[in-house]
């Protein structure tokens, strides 16, 4: 449903499929595996950031887990976790 976060890593697939392809001021472009909850196939897509300086540690090429929500016509990142970072 709109406004509900989806944790991509919780979809039951391998978490190492998520890779940051590009970092812009207002978006992260992420290649991700299928997201069954939304009936999405594997794809590369841009996700809006909640604010321009969000997730400054994330760089192109990083492997990540992420959470997002529907925000108008876009999907906005809620959290991004770099793989291998300390918990």
Image: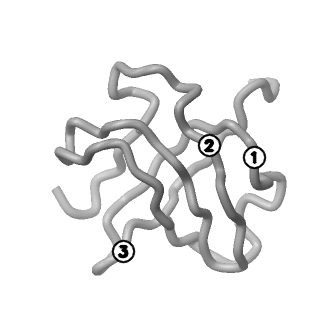
**Residue linked to disc 3:** 74
Work out how far the residue at label 3 is from the one at label 1, CA to CA, in angstroms: 23 Å
Residue 28 vertical position relative to residue 15 in the rendered view, above or below: below
Q: Residue at x 21, y 63 (%)?
A: 2
Work out how far the residue at label 2 is from the one at label 3, CA to CA, in angstroms: 19 Å
Q: Could you tell which of marks 3 and 1 lies nearer the N-terminus?
A: 1
**Residue linked to disc 1:** 61
Q: Is residue 57 left or right of residue 66?
A: right
Q: Could you tell which of marks 1 and 2 lies nearer the N-terminus?
A: 2
Expressed as whole percent of the image width and height from the top left, the position of residue 79 reads 57, 50
Q: Which callout, 3 or 1, points to the residue nearer the camera? A: 1
Seen from the viewer's position, the closer of residues 32 and 7 is: 32
Expressed as whole percent of the image width and height from the top left, the position of residue 3 reads 28, 62
Quadrant in which the N terminus is drawn:
bottom left
Q: Residues within 10 Å of mark 1 (few under 14, many from 20)?
A: few
Please tell me how many numbered marks the rendered image carries. 3
Local SS, label 3 = strand
Q: Residue at x 58, y 70 (%)?
A: 49
**Residue linked to disc 2:** 19
Query: Does the CB distance between marks 1 and 2 fall below 8 Å?
Result: yes
Expressed as whole percent of the image width and height from the top left, the position of residue 5 reads 35, 50
Q: Residues within 10 Å of mark 2 (few under 14, many from 20)?
A: many
Local SS, label 1 = loop
Work out how far the residue at label 1 is from the one at label 2, CA to CA, in angstroms: 6 Å
């Amino acid at each position: 449903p709109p406004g509900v976060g989806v944790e991509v890593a919780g979809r039951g697939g391998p978490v190492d499929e998520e890779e940051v392809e590009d970092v812009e001021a207002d978006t992260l472009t992420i290649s991700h595996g299928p997201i069954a909850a939304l009936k999405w196939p594997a794809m590369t897509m841009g996700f809006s950031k909640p604010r321009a300086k969000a997730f400054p540690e994330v760089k192109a090429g990083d492997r990540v887990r992420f959470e997002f929500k529907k925000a108008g016509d876009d999907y906005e990142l809620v959290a991004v976790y770099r793989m291998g970072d300390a918990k």
